[in-house]
Amino acid sequence: MPETLCPRPMNRFLQIFKVPELRNKILIVAGLLVAYRVLAAVPIPGVDLARLQQYFGSNQLFGFLNFFSGGGLSNLSIVMLGVGPYITATIIMQLLTIIFPRMKEMYYEEGARGQAKFNQYARLITVPLALVQSYGFLTLLMSQGVIARPDPFSLVRNIIVIAAGSMIALWLGELITEQKVGNGISLIILAGIISRLPSSIGTALVSYTPAMLPTYIGFIVIAVLLIGGIVYLNEGERKIPVAYARRVRGNKMYGGAQSYLPLKVNQAGMIPLIFAISVLLFPQFAASIVNIFSNHWGVALNNFATGFVNNQLAYGIVYFLLVFAFTYFYTAITFNPEEVAKNLQRSGGFVPGIRPGENTEKFFGSVTNRITFFGAVFLGLIAVLPIIIQRITGIAVLTISGTAILIVVAVALETMRQIDSQLTVREYEGIE
């Protein structure tokens, strides 16, 4: 076999920069990510940075949302919402597929054209969501004294600027996706996580003492094991054997092939974490809205929400249960055993030992429920991992964000697959 078809890993990495088209795509993606990071460093007017850092350091919920803003929320930049409104809009659209059969048909049965229309509707919903979320964030931060209360004109201006920044983030993400070397939305989130790494390492080194060496070593070991576990979870799947019946058309025989249907252990990805954090954030958003009509009830509701977040045991238990429940919920939305069984039967396929139709549907449902249990438990543990680490070590600077590692690993694996597929195509085309 020619050497170009089975290159060593290092040679394959170097090939990325030897192929002009692929090299240009990677440089374009890098440039777009740098442009986003520049926007994430431009704050809106009237921000008290010292008060802002203190507030975010004591609020785990907003620290989590900072991931999905690509790091733009940590300094209230003009892209402080990042791609969050679009993610919310996508979730709403997927929920609508349950309520409206036409939406379900468009997403699942009309192919690429239907999904393009589906995504267009999600973009349209993103605009009002960005306006509402920007107002909610600003109102909440004003009630906490993080930013000064502006005049009505300045408030409207900031809301429009933040909503426009969210649409710019979505546009940059789509430009990145067009290069086909990774998902743009995911890479923007990844860039925000990585941008915080130097400051986190610096903080850990400053607080280091020789007596803490065993703790730091244990922290590194746990981090490595967690990365391995996330890779195993993300790549884990149950392969359902599928056979295709033989059929004769004219003088030719078709079918008779053996294949398999992969069912991923973690079909929901990181969406359950977003659902759960949205529920946990709701009391604080509700407090900001109630505060407009009644300052007394608004303060009371905000104090309740703050007290709940500061109670790590109650917060951790509720967070875990929400992630567990939403994992099953979202898996039920994205994987429909009835549709899979029908499509399999239409194509002449069947699971050996299982009758086509209703029995196959029940079989897929049973298998999905069993493997989803392990994915739900693992996602729940990832969500509450920072709390567990802090309780064990007692050191605030040593926190492993399982959510951040999950995002980094998933995005890195997907980007590697897309780059590898492009390299493979060019190898078969004779490009070395």
Image (cartoon, rainbow, N blue to C red):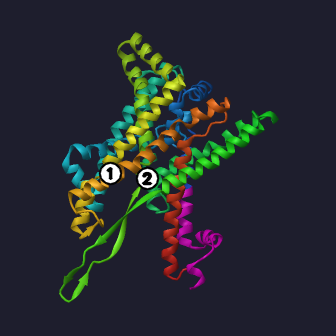
Contact (Cβ within 8 Å) of mark 2 with mark 1: no
The image quarter containing residue 291 is top left
Q: Secondary structure at mark 1?
A: helix
The one nearer the camera, 27 or 210, is 210
Residue span colored magenta: 1-30
Residue position for label 2: 265
Instruction: Name the amino acid, label 1.
Output: Ser
In the drawing, does residue 79 fall left or right of residue 132?
right
Q: Earlier in the sequence, mark 2 or mark 1?
A: 2
Can residue 207 be seen here? The reply is: yes
Q: How many dots with numbers?
A: 2
Label 1: how many Cα within 10 Å (few below 14, some 14–19, many 20+): few
The residue most toward the front is 353
Q: Which mark is residue 366?
A: 1
- 241 w.r.t. 369: above or below: below
Magenta stretch, main secondary structure, is helix
